[in-house]
Image: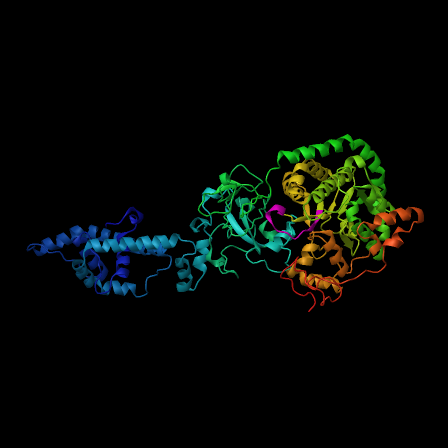
Amino acid sequence: AGTKNSIAQSSLPTLYLISLELCPSNSINFQFKSIQFNSIMVSIRNGTPLTRKRPSPSSSSSSSSWMLHLPQIIGVFLIATISFYGGIWVGMRMTGSEAMPSSSSSSLRADTHREAAATEEFGREEFEKRVEAEVKKRLAAAAAANSPVDGDIGQNNNDNNDIDKLYSDKSKQPRRFPSSIKSFATGAAIVSKRDFLTRFDYGIPMPPSKREGESDPGKDDVLLLYGSDRALPDDHPTSPVYHDHRHAAAADGSPLPHLSAAAATANCSGLNVIFTDNHGDVHQCTAIVGNYESYHIQRWLRMNPSKGYSKLDPHLPLHPVGRGLQTNGQDKFSAPEDKYALQNQELLIAYFERLEGTLAELRPLARECAGGDNTVVVMVCNTGQSDLLINFICSAEARGFGDVVREKVLVFATDQGVYDIATGLGLRAFYDEKIFEQMPEKEAGMYGDKSFTAMMWSKVVTVQLVNRLGHDVLFQDVDLVWYKNPLEFFHDKTNPLHDFDILFQDDGARSLRYAPYSANTGFYYVRNNDKTKFLFRSLLYLGDMVLSMTSHQQALGALLDEHSSLTGLRVKTLSGLDFPGGYHYHRKKEIEPMRDIVEGRHVPYIFHMSWTTNKKNKLLFLKQMGLWYTNTLCENGGGVGAAKISKEESTMESSCCSAEPLVSCHYSDKPSVKECKDSPKARSIDAKGKPFWK
């Protein structure tokens, strides 16, 4: 009596059991609404005759009265018995673990007289409050995921049969996700990231300082959401969907099932992959919205757009922003201004006016370089960087790749001087004064200056032209040396990476503007197909973006992400161990891999002296790495004079090239093939540099 609708269907004896648990044995707080019914219950339970006080009845009338009420007594007995045991069953179902003590039956009979006393001692109102509170507590516990009730079942019974029976009935198991999001999250599982990315290689790089098998704390696993019951794995059809305490004791304490990538995705007919990370001081949240599908991330930050996106301010509301906006307020993907569009327009006019003549002149040169494997090694150079070009040729000759380089390399000269040097070294070269008339002859003073930016545009055009002619392209900068022939790597059909459309050296940077591939545009391989042609055609038309960002690396990186989504272009970032560059040279975390290289324990395919502000430092680093093969005569533009002499005497290679590396020490805190302990530190480059040699 007095209970709410949530327990209205429970029988009266069920409430009686709860009262026994709540109240001390000497003060059972229970009161039947009908004292007469209470007396009948007491009589039945004790097995004593039922007596009723009447005013001086006769013996015969008493007997007839007893017989008169016999059907009612039997009915009450049956009802009470059914209710009693039914109440016990319902109570146990509600609590999940609260089994009656084995001595409960005898206790009930022994405490009958105390019950009657208790009904007079305690008030009905107080009892109802306590019963209601206990019922609410039990109902909440039974509904909670991984509730203590579930654990108590196993502990009290020491028997998992009841548990297995409970979890075999899906209708009684709590779901991990509500039905309101079941179209994209009906279940979930955990998969090792290494296992997942090995099976589904989207081409993104691992953290640059992580070795094979090394942990990446907080990002070692993948969260997989199932958007359909049919997508659930056959071997684990329920654990991704329902809470099951039996799966909560995983090695890391995760309640989600840990599955292999193969098992987890066995029934997935489609798979959408999201790459995400926390940057700096952003307290990031990720929302997945069931809606008309998008293949882009919609980004929001607490910044004020009306104030030009100053620094992140936690007191501001969230505003939609572009992907390149950093927390310091700098926008790395701001739209190009009109002046850059006009500059690109002039460049494109020259390009299209000369296009047919250019292709006619270029076609036979590219065909000769392509040979049987249809690959052209493209290099772009001006006179200011000609000593680096010479060093590449000299190093290739000294290391046994001279014939391959002379056969495969096509140099796009942006001025007459470097054209003479390239042909003087026996290379095929292309120079069109009309196309490259705005290109500088001097090397860039630093990364991102006008000379550097102009050269970046020329690198876009040259690859696009050769790709348009139907050839595969290995593009590489001139500040690079081969340890092994990289063409063998790209042409190997047994290589798991052979199916990728375009493959890049890992730049090492993990800033927003290079996400998600961190592609270094100083060394990459392009397979000729419609997807790559569309990519470089699009990049050509985005010249204003290249000019405004001072580099084609950032613009191309953005297009890689877009085209991989739009056309299915397969992009791969190569291992930094086999294709190292300036990042690995300058970063302290990469000292051991660099030590393995200089001491001969590991032989990479190439080394690219990137991440260096100017040519002067490039030469110094290459010299102490044992990668410099150019004589002093041909440094700093001296190759132009050597080229003029070579036209008459054909002695340019002998004048410029050394058969052995010209090693010299310059910095003690930079990698070197010999100990440079007595050299100064490169404080202007790395203020916290430590000696490379111990």
Identify whether 185 is placed above or below 481: above
Q: Quadrant of the C terminus?
A: bottom right
**Above or below, comparing residue 300 to residue 580 in the picture:** above
Note whether residue 127 is visible: yes
The image position of residue 9, as x and y in percent, is 30, 48
In the foreground, 14 or 410 = 410
Total number of numbered labels?
Answer: 0
Identified at 60% across, 41% down, the residue is: 333
162 is higher (above) or lower (below) than 335 = below
Q: Is residue 552 above or below residue 402?
A: above
What residue range appears in magenta?
503-515
Q: Residue furthest bottom?
A: 694
Q: Looking at the image, which is closer to me, 232 or 635? A: 635
Q: Position of residue 370 (x, y in %)?
A: 83, 43
Apparent side of residue 302 relative to residue 603 in the rendered image (left or right): left
Question: Could you tell me residue 574's position as x and y percent?
Answer: 70, 52
Looking at the image, residue 168 sits to the left or right of residue 516; the answer is: left
Q: Kindly identify the residue that appears in the image at 10 percent across and 56 percent down.
A: 53
Depth order, front residue of 588/344: 344
Image coords of residue 157 (percent x, y): 40, 63
Q: Does residue 247 appear left or right of residue 413 in this picture?
A: left
